[in-house]
Amino acid sequence: MLDMEKRNNAQLGKPALQALEENLPFWKSLEEDQRSTLLNASAQFWYPKGALLHHNRAECTGLVMVLEGRLRIYTVSDTGKEITLYRLFERDICILSASCLIRNITFDVHVQAETDTMVLRIATDAYQKIAAMNSKVQDFTNQLVSSRFSDVMWVVEQVVFMSIDRRLAMHLLEAASMAGSETFSTTHDAIARDLGTAREVVTRMLNRFQDEKLVAVGRGFITLVNRDGLYKLT
Amino acid sequence: MLDMEKRNNAQLGKPALQALEENLPFWKSLEEDQRSTLLNASAQFWYPKGALLHHNRAECTGLVMVLEGRLRIYTVSDTGKEITLYRLFERDICILSASCLIRNITFDVHVQAETDTMVLRIATDAYQKIAAMNSKVQDFTNQLVSSRFSDVMWVVEQVVFMSIDRRLAMHLLEAASMAGSETFSTTHDAIARDLGTAREVVTRMLNRFQDEKLVAVGRGFITLVNRDGLYKLT
């Protein structure tokens, strides 16, 4: 009985341990007890599509490692308008959900499971404790912050410098690529929230794309009809 | 003669030393030789209004501390469109001009003297050397990066969520505040480059503001006529 429980625990622990080993570049540099601390502070959570994992700095959800699925990180205005900042895929780690770790971060982001998503959450206090003892952990945190800063600069450049038809074409090609299919489910509203624009703008532009035989727009889905034509717009 | 030279050097050295002491929070934690290394790696430069201090990552200009004047940090599209990301004032330190220090920064910014500006430039290699020996230096770098990340998020929120009349009103109030006067010199083009919009949009909106007796628009300058009215728009 005891053996059985142990085995179960060992099995439960294994994916977490493996995920930490494989995805934390500083893992090998940790002492044995530091590894235990991090492992004990890590827990798997499953979120259904659409669930909100994190929505402001006050929470400090912890570092979130994507094991399966996809996260969308976005910001929301007072009036509920949204824009997607970036997405995180398998093996990626969300640092802004642990922004309490980072001084001078003065903005909030929302983190949403964009598909059914399994994550490993690492508690902030344990991570912080290890970071104080090992500069490689701190380096890793800083690299994550700089990467996300670069992602957000890419958003600035897109929003400010690119026309909406170009951005929409890029969005549609990316959505098809994420879905692994020329046809994918979406709504005008979801696209507008992704691009930080008004639904009417998306509708108008999709109608134009449809007139130009670039896409076919259905109720709740879009099919890419002329992928090359869309590429030319980007 | 030698005495004279020494005194001159000492005098030249003093503002640099004072600036480092006063504006680097980790200064007190440095060893004497580390302080010398940083001081010897620091040099004052004067830039006339409009001069470009830095325009891409490949340069690695170094950390730039503003001693007098003002820097504008902005990004530029392939077609020459611009948007201001943030401004740095006296005692502020520009970290993105030393972005070669920071892994995973994948974007370029331009740094321009917006007025006649005196800066202290700290060479990257010396700074990096000290940072490797003192975690407080690294902490300071990280805090600067996070602060600028927060500044850029503010730009995203402004561009995506705020109407152009609101952004223009905020810009005009800020410009008057920086000039210390209700009348300040500017052009429609300069405002457009600041806000990341088209000159025509600025012209149209300024004409509306003028019709509404909020501002008076002259050739090369603007006067705030109804400051409260502008505040109401923000």
Image (cartoon, coloured by chain):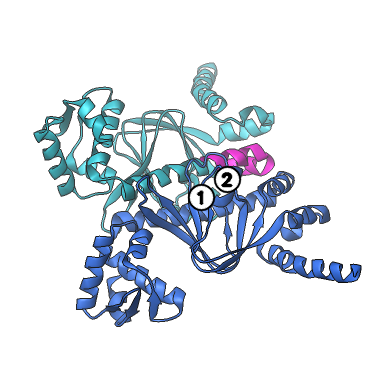
Chain colours: A blue, B cyan
Q: Is residue B207 left or right of residue B192?
A: left
Amino acid marked by disc 1: His
Q: Position of residue B71 (x, y in %)?
A: 37, 36
The answer for how far apart the CA atoms under marks 2 and 1 are is 8 Å
The structure residue drawn at horizontal position 31% and vertical position 32%, both measured from the top left corner, is B115
The picture quadrant where one finds residue B73 is top left
Q: Position of residue A3 (x, y in %)?
A: 90, 70
Image quarter where the C terminus of chain A lies is bottom left
The answer to whether residue A25 of the structure is visible from this angle is no
Q: Quick one: SS at disc 1?
A: loop
Q: Is residue B134 left or right of residue B92?
A: right
Q: Position of residue B20 (x, y in %)?
A: 54, 28
Q: Is residue B1 left or right of residue B117?
A: right
Q: Nearer the viewer, residue A6 or A170?
A: A6
Quick check: marks 2 and 1 in contact, CB under 8 Å? yes
Image quarter where the N terminus of chain A lies is bottom right
Q: Is residue B48 magenta?
A: no
Q: Which residues, given as a range, are shown in magenta?
A: B126-144
Q: Is residue B128 magenta?
A: yes
The structure residue drawn at horizontal position 28% and vertical position 22%, both measured from the top left corner, is B180
Residue under pointer 2: A59
Q: Residues within 10 Å of mark 1 (few under 14, many from 20)?
A: some
Residue under pointer 1: A55
Q: Farthest residue in the right direction?
A: A2
Amino acid marked by disc 2: Glu
